Image (cartoon, grey):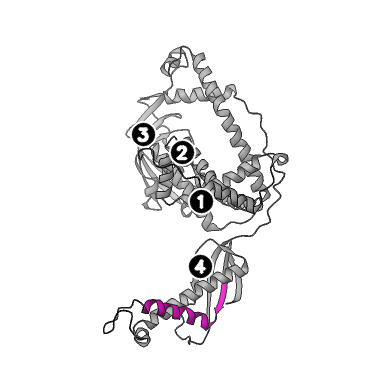
């Protein structure tokens, strides 16, 4: 194998032009014939006894093509190793099919692949979580109380023109440059006028409308519209007002407290809210400490990441969001309409999470941190408890969906974060590789508990 050319063709994307000597193809071809001839069923010959020349006449072209492919894959793999590249995508080959090539001539082809970049890991040995003096404030208590109040709100229909603060049920038929605009069309949607959660100009266009009235709105889609190709285009909205409602919030008095549960007064309800907030404060503190470590790592290590890895992370983020929104009776598409910055926010999050994953992976190597079977079991069990499901069922689901490697990876990242959460002066030195292997083998001997519950 010889690398003829190495060229950067994009972000974390390399094109290698490689030459494979003809004898490598010959070796692959011999292996293919040897394996196939043992079981070849050719008319006129006993199974596995067909002569080589017969097989060549019948399958020679296909076998040669397969031998070239195998030799190219192996040669490209060696080329990546020689270049010190860790591929994250399957190579895309070009030039393998050359009908004028002779048997004694080398194969010259190119392959493109995305790779994990090499980066100089910034010093992390002195990182420490940024301490914060958190306490439950009266503002948080009031905000939680107000949230309870809104959840108990009633909505009453009114017979008057639309005003700011109204909840307007309407049907929307949208077109974009004269063509149907399906993503913005809704047979029934509720708009909180004045919330500024919809496309700029849409809510204002409903002010003064009455029930049964249809408003024709021409709006230029903003520069941060989720679908990039539609930005700056003019959309037409035909909006029919079906109902106008106003929100009626209950009074924050003792009667409201009694409706919320076993409370005699509004003061009792506020005390209950405060205690609940205090119970979750420790979790919030740890989350903030971990976020401070993450932010320090990201700020100190700036480098490009493979687009395919970012896209995979983005797909996961959006799938989780959509699942959660659908559980609440909404969807990701609706959320994008309400929050026009959601797509950009998710993209930034996906890029940062991908970069952080590579940073933590490098720290794990430096510190000889690995995930033992016990580490993995504890991590997944904790996840199951947080989601209030049976850990045995959770383990089984992971295995059935072939997600073991994904969760094991997450367990490793959490182990690295736990290491970084320890103040530098208190961190134990990394175990020697031999010692760590013994510990991993001992942990692996502890079997996972067998099924002890119903499938959920």
Q: Which mark is first along the chain, 2 or 3? A: 3
Q: Mark number for residue 91?
A: 4
> In front: 87, or 186?
87
Residue at x 44% of width, y 81% of height: 30
Quarter of the figure that contains the C terminus: top left
Few, some or many C-alpha atoms within 10 Å of disc 1 (few <14, some 14-19, many ≥20)?
Answer: many
Q: For the residues marked 1 and 3, what is the alpha-carbon distance in whole angstroms? A: 36 Å
Q: Mark number for residue 133?
A: none
Asked if the residues shown at circle 3 and circle 4 are in contact, with their CB atoms under 8 angstroms apart, the answer is no
Q: Which residues are magenta?
A: 16-37
Quarter of the figure that contains the N terminus: bottom right
Q: Quadrant of residue 304?
A: bottom right
User: For the image shown, how many numbered marks are present on the structure?
Assistant: 4
- Give the labeled residue for mark 2: 384
Q: Which mark is first along the chain, 1 or 4? A: 4
Q: Residue furthest left?
A: 44
Kind of element beneath mark 3: strand
Q: Which mark is first along the chain, 4 or 2? A: 4
Q: Position of residue 373 (x, y in %)?
A: 52, 47
Asked if the residues shown at circle 3 and circle 2 are in contact, with their CB atoms under 8 angstroms apart, the answer is no
- Residue 108 seen from this side: yes
Residue 452 to residue 27: above or below: above
Residue at x 39% of width, y 44% of height: 237
Q: Which mark is first along the chain, 3 or 1? A: 3
Few, some or many C-alpha atoms within 10 Å of disc 4 (few <14, some 14-19, many ≥20)?
Answer: some
Q: Quadrant of residue 389?
A: top left
Q: For the residues marked 2 and 4, what is the alpha-carbon distance in whole angstroms? A: 38 Å
Q: Nearer the viewer, mark 1 or mark 2?
A: 2
Q: Nearer the viewer, mark 2 or mark 4?
A: 2
Q: Position of residue 27 (x, y in %)?
A: 48, 80
Q: Quadrant of residue 418?
A: top right
Q: For the residues marked 3 and 4, what is the alpha-carbon distance in whole angstroms? A: 52 Å
């Amino acid at each position: 194998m010889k690398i003829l050319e190495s060229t950067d063709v994009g972000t974390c994307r390399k094109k290698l032009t490689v030459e494979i000597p003809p004898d490598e193809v010959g070796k692959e071809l011999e292996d293919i014939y040897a394996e196939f001839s043992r079981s070849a069923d050719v008319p006129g010959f006993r199974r596995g006894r067909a002569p080589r020349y017969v097989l060549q006449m019948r399958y020679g072209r296909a076998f040669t093509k397969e031998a070239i492919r195998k030799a190219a894959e192996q040669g490209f793999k060696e080329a990546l190793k020689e270049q010190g590249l860790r591929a994250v995508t399957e190579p895309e080959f070009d030039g393998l099919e050359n009908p004028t090539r002779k048997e004694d001539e080398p194969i010259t082809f190119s392959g493109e692949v995305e790779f994990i970049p090499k980066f100089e890991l910034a010093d992390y040995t002195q990182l420490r979580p940024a301490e914060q003096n958190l306490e439950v404030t009266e503002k948080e208590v009031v905000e939680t109380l107000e949230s309870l109040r809104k959840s108990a709100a009633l909505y009453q229909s009114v017979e008057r023109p639309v005003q700011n603060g109204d909840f307007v049920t309407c049907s929307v038929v949208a077109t974009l440059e004269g063509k149907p605009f399906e993503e913005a069309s809704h047979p029934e949607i509720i708009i909180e006028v004045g919330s500024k959660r919809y496309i700029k100009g849409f809510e204002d266009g409903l002010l003064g409308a009455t029930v049964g009235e249809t408003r024709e709105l021409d709006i230029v889609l903003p520069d941060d519209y989720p679908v990039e190709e539609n930005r700056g285009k003019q959309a037409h909205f035909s909006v029919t007002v079906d109902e106008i409602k106003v929100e009626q919030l209950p009074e924050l008095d003792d009667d409201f407290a009694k409706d919320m549960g076993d409370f005699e007064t509004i003061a009792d309800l506020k005390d209950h809210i405060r205690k609940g907030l205090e119970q979750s404060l420790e979790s919030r503190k740890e989350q903030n400490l971990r976020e401070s470590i993450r932010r320090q790592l990201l700020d100190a290590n700036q480098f490009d990441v493979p687009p395919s890895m970012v896209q995979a992370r983005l797909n996961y983020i959006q799938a989780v969001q959509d699942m959660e929104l659908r559980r609440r009776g909404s969807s990701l598409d609706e959320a994008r309409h309400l929050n026009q910055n959601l797509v950009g926010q998710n993209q930034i999050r996906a890029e940062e999470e991908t970069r952080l994953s590579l940073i933590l992976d490098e720290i794990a190597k430096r510190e000889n941190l690995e995930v033992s079977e016990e580490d993995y079991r504890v991590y997944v069990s904790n996840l199951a408890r947080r989601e209030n499901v049976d850990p045995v069922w959770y383990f089984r689901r992971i295995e059935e969906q072939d997600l073991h490697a994904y969760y094991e990876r997450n367990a490793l990242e959490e182990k690295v974060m736990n290491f970084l959460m320890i103040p530098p002066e208190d961190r134990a030195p990394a175990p020697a590789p031999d010692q760590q292997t013994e510990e991993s083998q001992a942990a692996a001997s502890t079997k996972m508990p067998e099924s002890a519950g119903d499938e959920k």
